[in-house]
Image (cartoon, grey):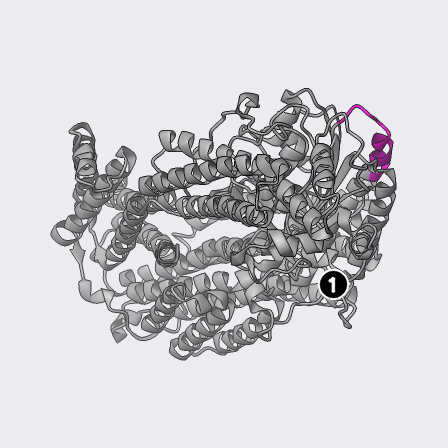
């Protein structure tokens, strides 16, 4: 009878509590899914391939429109990863930055009067996200990225869009690649020969570059390739590891300069050299975002002196001499680019695609949106050069300059026409597959291009009359320049339209996602204010289920009835069927939850109004939500969180139990939190506003910090006094492995990649294995102590000892986990992690001290004093969890992270590995990036068990004061109450994260 009674009382309550938590979790995930469906849009991929169209050749030479129309027979493409523009530019900066004037080859060639005509330097503007895989796609296809592409940097799938490499192979030419293995992932099977090396080990500065150099110069002697790609990674890895201001960067750039000097000596007259960066780097040496330093890469092109106009290349119809300064300023400078100078010109990174395609005589890739670099096409054919000399034989130099410009413009405009026609074909095809582009804009662009091409045809007839002397050559040049400017304006407008279109979002899905997230938050708040007896639990749960089923039926009915088509016909944007079904399920399920709370269970809406400490903590959470809607507060979120955390901590301390241990602990947490701000990394926007980067600590200081932290943790957990030998020795091995890893990484002053294999991977794997052993021991001890605790129901003293042993065991596991996180965290940010763990230790000690006071034998029946222990425990727990949520958010910044792509610590992906392993790398990056959240999450069970212990022990008090309930019923009620308390704690934690998530999503939608 006792067991049946206990089952009837406890099971429905437990089932309802857990079920509601799962429902709220699902509601949150639905909201996230709908929001991301609208926010992370992708563009349609068209797999059409461009082809030669020789029949459309309108010029007698057919330049760029025949398979033999290449201006150069070969090209060498040197990609220096993360080559920032100012690394290439000669500098007079007196501060002598480590990267200044180290790459001297471009500056020397540009200032040499004999060679300046054959070299060009540009600022190479990349599109965000500035990650290597996305930039290589842009450099080969000419397409624009979307926001979601940033998450695909680890997953380099084969490029399906048309690109100049596949065009090269399709037209019987060959390519060789060496360096970054991302090329092999993106263009597998396209290369004649490949020498590829692992690209993600950012601590290895030399292996990839040495491999490239070893194969580059032997390949230069081979004659069976058309394009040679050499992708160096040392500069990028040096930036990630040391930053651009480290002496190691100067050495690496000097090394690249030597390579370029030797490479230029190997070039022949029919080969063009491109030296370019796929992206730049921040002041910290990172990349991934859209700051000026990240998108501002360098681009340098060079060819040796072109053959004379009287010789004819087998593969060329023109003398390819790059545009000198006087030609650019007189003819190619556009009115809308007046701020540019010849020395500081900018081109878009995707402009490289049509440029290299036409220079090598290839069709421009079908999906390209770039514009040719005009300076490389302002050239004369041999026949045109003869014609100019013949016409101006007895006239002054101005005549030759004008006639030369007319023929150069004709060549340039042919290239521009091919570029514009290719873009128009892409827009036409894309608009048939998708309705992304505005119809009116497409019609206007098409009409504009037709007008430009019609004028181009008229000007062609004018140029043909030059021989007859019937043409006003100066007016002809002006008209040709206007025609060139019109082509540029058309291509610029197309790019602007596509950028605006692919930056648009599905507003309907975004709004639906925000609505569901709002319903989830309100449902969580409602659940925290209601109480449901065991007899009401089943009815309340069925009410939520029925509501969700009704929502499913309504959603399917909406889809099947074709109501979305009616809305679309009315000009109203209708969501897709998945959005409709998920939205109706969420709304109706939330309505069922509301009905169950007010009609079946008892919900006290007055409890929604926080009081005292709860009000202060809640206000801090609300202020944190609001800061996302301000750009300034978003940039300085780390400082905002420090203020909010300190405010919450002061309120908790003033309103808490006045125990010396608690007061001193809270004061220590306040001091440590303020200290931890020193270990946050600066965002790009914070430089120049007093933000100081944390320096790499000395090995001695790290050992001292480790020793202090270990001593504190060992005393707090009883590691040396009450734990088993295996546990003690395992954690000691973790401590030694961490110290060894720091010694090898910092103390020996060598690059980790030069160490023996076992020294690189040994210490981390000792820590990984040690944490696994500690976890197994913890689980085993928890099982044993649970059995003892069950016996403790008859013996309160034995049960109390068992519960304390459980808490000590879990704290030791938490200590072991912190050591594991320390080894995947950069050494300069480890002190911030230790400060976090110390704060958590103080919070746990304070919670246990309060619990001990509540259950002390000096106060056996606190209910007589009018104190509701259950309510007091629950309130204190919820406030503590909200505070710990703030701690996790704040120490995310204090462990060297920011809410931006460039601050991702990529080095963590290789701790314990010497090569790229996809899944371990992702796990290690998650451990590193979210170390603060994970360590706080790992402390939750200890806080919950402490609260549950307090609740369980105080729930035994009524039997000392009253004997109305039987023992079995009392135990069942106590178990149900503990489960309900733990579930409420989880809901409160979920609510805290969800409201922050809701405000972040709302701010993102507002600032989109």
Q: Is residue 413 left or right of residue 100?
A: left
For label 1, count other residues whose C-alpha is less than 10 Å away and answer few (under 14), some (14-19) or many (20+).
some
Callout 1: SS: loop
Q: Quadrant of residue 345?
A: bottom right
Residue 358 to residue 351: above or below: above
Q: Is residue 807 magenta?
A: no
- For the record, the magenta segment spans 213-225
Q: Position of residue 748 (x, y in %)?
A: 84, 56
Q: Is residue 612 left or right of residue 452?
A: left
Residue at 78% across / 66% down in the picture?
A: 700
> Along the line of sight, which residue is nearer the eye, 147 or 127?
127
Residue at far left of view: 599
Q: Position of residue 852 (x, y in %)?
A: 44, 67
Residue 556 to residue 672: above or below: above
Q: Position of residue 609 (x, y in %)?
A: 24, 68
Residue at 62% across / 58% down in the picture?
A: 293
Q: Quadrant of the C terminus?
A: bottom left
> Along the line of sight, which residue is nearer the eye, 875 or 383?
383
Q: Position of residue 591 (x, y in %)?
A: 17, 47
Q: Quadrant of the N terminus?
A: top left
> Along the line of sight, which residue is nearer the eye, 742 or 123?
123
**Main secondary structure of the magenta stretch:** helix
Q: Is residue 723 visible?
A: no
> Along the line of sight, which residue is nearer the eye, 581 or 589?
581
The residue under label 1 is: 245
Residue at 24% across / 38% down in the picture?
A: 580
Residue 826 to residue 772: above or below: below
Residue 456 to residue 664: above or below: above
Q: Is residue 223 magenta?
A: yes
């Amino acid at each position: 009878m006792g067991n049946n009674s206990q089952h009837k009382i406890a099971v429905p309550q437990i089932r309802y509590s857990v079920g509601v938590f799962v429902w709220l979790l699902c509601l949150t995930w639905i909201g996230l899914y709908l929001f991301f469906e609208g926010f992370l849009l992708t563009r349609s991929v068209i797999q059409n391939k461009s082809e030669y169209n020789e029949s459309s050749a309108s010029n007698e030479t057919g330049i760029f429109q025949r398979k033999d129309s290449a201006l150069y027979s070969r090209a060498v493409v040197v990609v220096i990863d993360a080559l920032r523009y100012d690394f290439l530019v000669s500098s007079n900066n007196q501060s002598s930055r480590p990267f200044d004037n180290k790459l001297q080859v471009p500056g020397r060639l540009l200032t040499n009067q004999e060679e300046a005509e054959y070299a060009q330097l540009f600022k190479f503007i990349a599109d965000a996200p500035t990650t290597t895989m996305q930039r290589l796609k842009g450099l080969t296809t000419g397409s624009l990225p979307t926001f979601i592409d940033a998450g695909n940097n680890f997953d380099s799938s084969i490029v399906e869009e048309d690109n100049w490499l596949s065009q090269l192979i399709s037209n019987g030419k060959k390519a060789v690649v060496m360096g970054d293995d991302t090329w092999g992932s993106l263009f597998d099977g396209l290369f004649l020969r490949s020498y590829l090396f692992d690209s993600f080990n950012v601590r290895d500065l030399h292996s990839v570059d040495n491999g490239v150099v070893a194969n580059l110069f032997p390949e230069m002697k081979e004659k069976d390739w058309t394009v040679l790609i050499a992708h160096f990674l040392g500069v990028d890895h040096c930036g990630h590891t040391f930053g651009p201001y480290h002496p190691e960067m100067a050495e690496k750039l000097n090394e690249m300069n030597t390579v370029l000097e030797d490479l230029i000596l190997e070039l022949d007259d029919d080969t063009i050299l491109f030296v370019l960066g796929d992206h730049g780097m921040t002041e910290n040496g990172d990349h991934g975002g859209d700051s000026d330093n990240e998108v501002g890469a360098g681009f340098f092109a060079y060819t040796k002196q072109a053959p004379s106009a009287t010789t004819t290349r087998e593969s060329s119809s023109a003398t390819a001499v790059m545009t000198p300064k006087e030609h650019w300023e007189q003819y190619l400078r556009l009115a809308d680019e007046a701020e540019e100078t010849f020395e500081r010109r900018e081109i878009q990174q995707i402009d490289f695609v049509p440029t290299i395609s036409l220079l090598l005589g290839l069709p421009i890739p079908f999906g390209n949106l770039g514009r040719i670099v005009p300076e490389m096409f302002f050239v004369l054919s041999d026949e045109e050069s003869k014609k100019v000399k013949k016409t101006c034989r007895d006239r002054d130099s101005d005549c030759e300059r004008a006639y030369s410009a007319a023929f150069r413009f004709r060549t340039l405009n042919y290239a521009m026409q091919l570029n514009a026609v290719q873009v128009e074909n892409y827009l036409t095809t894309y608009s048939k597959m998708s309705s992304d582009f505005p119809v009116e804009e497409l019609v206007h662009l098409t009409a504009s291009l037709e007008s430009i091409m019609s004028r181009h045809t008229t000007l062609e007839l004018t140029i043909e009359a030059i021989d007859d002397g019937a043409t006003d050559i100066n007016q002809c040049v002006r008209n040709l320049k206007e025609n060139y400017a019109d082509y540029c304006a058309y291509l610029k407008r197309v790019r602007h339209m596509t950028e605006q279109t692919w930056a648009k979002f599905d507003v309907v899905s975004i709004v639906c996602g925000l609505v569901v997230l709002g319903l989830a938050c309100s449902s969580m708040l409602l659940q925290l204010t209601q109480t449901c007896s065991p007899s009401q639990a089943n009815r309340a749960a069925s009410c939520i289920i029925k509501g969700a089923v009704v929502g499913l039926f309504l959603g399917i009915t909406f889809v099947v009835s074709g109501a979305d088509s009616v809305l679309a016909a009315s000009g109203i944007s209708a969501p897709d069927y998945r959005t409709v079904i998920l939205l109706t399920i969420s709304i109706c399920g939330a309505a069922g939850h509301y009905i169950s709370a007010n009609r079946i269970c008892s919900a006290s809406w007055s409890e929604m109004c926080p009081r005292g400490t709860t009000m202060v903590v809640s206000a801090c959470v609300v202020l944190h939500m609001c800061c996302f809607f301000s750009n300034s507060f978003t940039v300085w979120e780390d400082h905002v969180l420090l203020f909010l955390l300190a405010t919450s901590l002061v309120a908790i301390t003033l309103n808490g139990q006045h125990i010396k241990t608690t007061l001193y602990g809270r004061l220590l947490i306040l001091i440590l939190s303020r200290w931890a701000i020193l270990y946050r990394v600066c965002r790009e926007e914070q430089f120049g506003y007093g933000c100081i980067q944390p320096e790499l600590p000395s090995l001695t200081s790290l050992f001292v910090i480790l020793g202090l932290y270990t001593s504190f943790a060992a005393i707090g957990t009883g590691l040396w006094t009450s734990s088993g030998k295996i546990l003690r020795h395992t954690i000691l091995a973790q401590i030694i492995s961490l110290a060894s890893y720091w010694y090898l990484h910092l103390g020996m002053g060598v690059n980790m990649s030069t160490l023996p294999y076992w020294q690189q991977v040994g210490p981390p794997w000792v820590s990984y294995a040690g944490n696994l052993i500690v976890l197994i021991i913890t689980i085993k001890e928890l099982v044993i102590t649970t059995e003892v605790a069950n016996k403790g129901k008859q013996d309160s003293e034995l049960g109390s000892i068992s519960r304390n042993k459980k808490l000590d065991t879990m704290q030791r596991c938490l200590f072991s986990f912190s050591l594991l996180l320390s080894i995947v965290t950069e050494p300069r940010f480890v002190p911030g992690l230790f400060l976090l763990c110390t704060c958590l230790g103080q919070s746990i000690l304070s919670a246990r001290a309060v619990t001990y006071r509540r259950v002390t034998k000096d106060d056996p029946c606190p209910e007589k004093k009018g104190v509701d222990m259950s309510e007091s425990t629950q309130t204190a727990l919820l406030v503590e969890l909200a505070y710990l949520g703030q701690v996790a958010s704040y120490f995310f910044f204090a462990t060297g992270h920011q809410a931006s792509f460039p601050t991702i610590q990529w080095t963590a992906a290789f701790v314990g590995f010497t090569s790229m392993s996809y899944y371990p790398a992702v796990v290690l990056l998650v451990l590193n990036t979210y170390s603060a959240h994970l360590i706080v999450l790992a402390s939750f069970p200890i806080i919950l068990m402490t609260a549950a212990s307090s609740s369980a022990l105080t729930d035994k008090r009524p039997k000392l004061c009253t004997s109305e309930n039987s023992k079995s019923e009392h135990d069942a009620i106590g178990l149900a109450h503990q489960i309900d308390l733990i579930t409420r704690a989880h809901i409160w934690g979920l609510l805290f994260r969800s409201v922050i998530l809701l405000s972040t999503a709302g701010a993102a939608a507002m600032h989109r």
